[in-house]
Amino acid sequence: MSRFIAEFACNKPDDMIKFISEDFFLKEGFEVANVKGEIVWKKGVGMMTAPQFVKLVYGGGKVHIEAWLKYAILPGVYAGEMGLDGFIGALPKANLKKRVDTLIGLLNQVTPADAVPQGAPAAAVQGAAVPPAGAPQGAPQAAVAQPAPVPVAVHNPTSKAVLALVVGILSIPVSWYFSALLGIVLGIVGITAGITGIKSTSKVMAIFGLVLSIIGAALGAVGWILNIVLLAA
């Protein structure tokens, strides 16, 4: 299946695109990788879900994004590519598509710089002091103000912190009273979400969720081992 491809003009300087995208990928747990000569952002090794890949190319305010997954034969061993459509691997595909949509939204955000009217004086745009008309050459000028940093919205995965807390709370009773295996799964989900949520403004919530998820997964693992031992006895 072909890769998901998105091309658009966000009309932002390259350094801003670089800052927003790198902040997003690092918070989501992606790492830079060289895959057959392509420099991409990669997440996962395929132990639980298919590894995710995103290729980002930008320049002159234009952005090109490609996203795909690979079939994991073994952890770190992949074969073939999957786009983001189709029934096979629907959950990881939807997960990656949501990430890509979030990144596109961040890159297309409206900043104060976007609101500057076309044809505005350069000094006004940069915030520089303009000498009064008719002032003699060489007359002292007011200090030139440095342009203020343009505020931009960055990725803030608070939803992952909430998910970690909710799943972490559920994982403990589920592991103890209902299903050890389900408790392990919930614990792993909570741990994964908590690691990402720690990088948000809801850090404390994410830490609580992470701790509870670890406890839930541990209880599930203990219960699973005990069930095997009892069945074998």
Image (tube, helix red, strand yellow):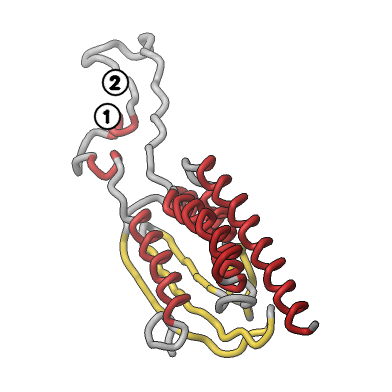
Please, what secondary structure does the residue beneath circle 1 have? helix
Amino acid at pointer 1: Ala
Quarter of the figure that contains the C terminus: bottom right
Q: Residues within 10 Å of mark 1 (few under 14, many from 20)?
A: few
Between the C-alphas of marks 2 and 1, the distance is 8 Å
Q: Examine the image and state in which quarter residue 58 appears.
A: bottom left
- Answer whether residue 21 is visible to the viewer in this image: no
Which residue occupies 77% across, 77% down? 229
From the image, tell me which residue sits under label 1. Answer: 124
Of residues 184 and 27, the one drawn nearer to the viewer in this rendering: 184
From the image, tell me which residue sits under label 2. Answer: 130
Which residue occupies 48% across, 85% down? 82
Of residues 62 and 228, the one drawn nearer to the viewer in this rendering: 228
Side of 73 relative to 231 (left or right): left
Dots 2, 1 in contact, CB < 8 A: yes
Of residues 26 and 167, the one drawn nearer to the viewer in this rendering: 167
Please, what secondary structure does the residue beneath circle 2 have? loop
